[in-house]
Image (cartoon, rainbow, N blue to C red):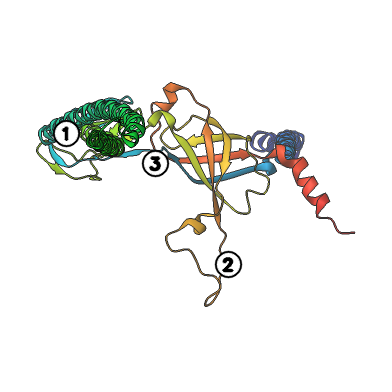
Amino acid sequence: MSTTAGAPGRDASSDTHSPDKRDIQTADNKTDNKTGNKSGKKRIVLIGLCIVALLAGATWLGHWWRVGRFIESTDDAYLQADSVTVAPKVSGYITDVFVADNQAVKAGDPLVKLDARQYQVALDQANATVDARQADIQHAEAQLVQQRANIAQTQAQQDVARVTLRHAQDEVARYAPLAATGAETVERLTELKSTRDQAQATLAADSASVEAARSQIAALTAQLAQARAQLEAARASAAQSQLDLDNTVVKAALSGRVGDRTVRVGQYVQPGTRMLTVVPVQQTYLTANFKETQIGRMRVGQPVEMRVDALSGHTLHGVVDSFAPGTGAQFALLPPENATGNFTKIVQRVPVRIRLDVGPETRSVLLPGMSVNVDVDTRSARDDDRRIDAENHRG
């Protein structure tokens, strides 16, 4: 009895302190299910990520095949502008400077003024010389008119002498027969011959006077031409003096902004002295230096995308405008001499000019010298590439 009674007591104790095997199995099953669910979810996520990566890779590869492989890029690109260095044409002391640093100017605006007093004096002297040469011309013309009158007078005297000679010859011819017959005295005939000879000598003298007067016309005409040439020289000198006077005011040759201003009032300058620079910031363009291996499919007119370091987050657009007629090394101060010494091949770069397709608001913040990253779309040259292959094909 005691043994039978003790057994239930042990069973009760064991039921109280240790779980049923079925409960343990159920708990293990739940844990396995949770672990399996988590692994399945991870698998699905990994598969999805792989699919997304494959799609992204395929998309990128397709974009690269259609577009990316035709894009040529470089960061060796800088904005430029055809700036003009302002220098005087005449020497003198600076009396006025009309512009300040970085000031915007228009073409024709005065920039600097030099002391103009000596040039004004030179102009006045040149004008006086012009007046003197004009007076010389008037004097020569008056002499020419007077000489023509003298010629007319001597010609009239020549005509009178000719008539007198004809009359004297007629008298001698009429009295000679009479003197031969004794109707007139020999003395009378002798007087008539003497009068005839005098008239002949007078006619010869008047004829010589006419020729002398006519030859004087040529001399006076040459003198008049010389006076006119001297007048032209004097006018040219006056024009040069006027130019020198005008050049004492230095004006802007183009519109832009003033930079590198070194001129000051009171400074003495000579022709060619650098005073300041006018930069046409509204006509800025881009020069990109591409490797020679990148320009094979570049053509004028191809679209360009640009990213200026000073305008982060903005993409600008442009067009290929032209190519330099040689690599940068060809125009260097000391071009390479590859035929001498050891040779190391270096990839050359070709400057490419790009026209900016931007508005005035964007141009207002673009300055020459800024760094730019450039992408050129060369897809339009695919046909050209095929034609080059075709014309260089050797069967």
Residue designated by label 2: 345
The answer to whether residue 32 is seen in the rendering is no
Of pointers 1 and 3, the one earlier in the residue sequence: 1
Q: Disc 3 to disc 2, how far (Cα)?
A: 29 Å
**Picture residue at 21% right of the left edge, 30% below the top:** 143
Q: Quadrant of residue 191?
A: top left
Q: Disc 1 to disc 3, how far (Cα)?
A: 53 Å
Q: Secondary structure at mark 3?
A: loop
**Picture residue at 20% right of the left edge, 35% below the top:** 241
Horizontal arrangement in the rendering, residue 155 relative to residue 113 (left or right)? right
Q: 356 or 52, which lies in front?
A: 356
Q: Where is 331 relative to 3, above or below?
A: below
Foreground mark, 1 or 3, reads: 1
Question: In the rendered structure, which amino acid carries the disc numbered 2?
Answer: Lys
Residue designated by label 3: 369
Residue lying furthest right: 395
Q: 208 or 349, which lies in front?
A: 208
Q: In x, y percent, where is residue 136?
A: 19, 32
Q: In x, y percent, where is residue 343?
A: 56, 73
Label 3 neighbour load within 10 Å: few <14, some 14-19, many 20+: some
Q: Quadrant of residue 145?
A: top left
Label 2 neighbour load within 10 Å: few <14, some 14-19, many 20+: few
Query: In which quadrant of the rendered image does the C terminus lie?
Result: bottom right
Q: Secondary structure at mark 2?
A: loop
Q: Disc 1 to disc 2, how far (Cα)?
A: 69 Å
Q: Quadrant of residue 45?
A: top right
Residue designated by label 1: 129
Q: Secondary structure at mark 1?
A: helix
Residue lying furthest bottom: 341
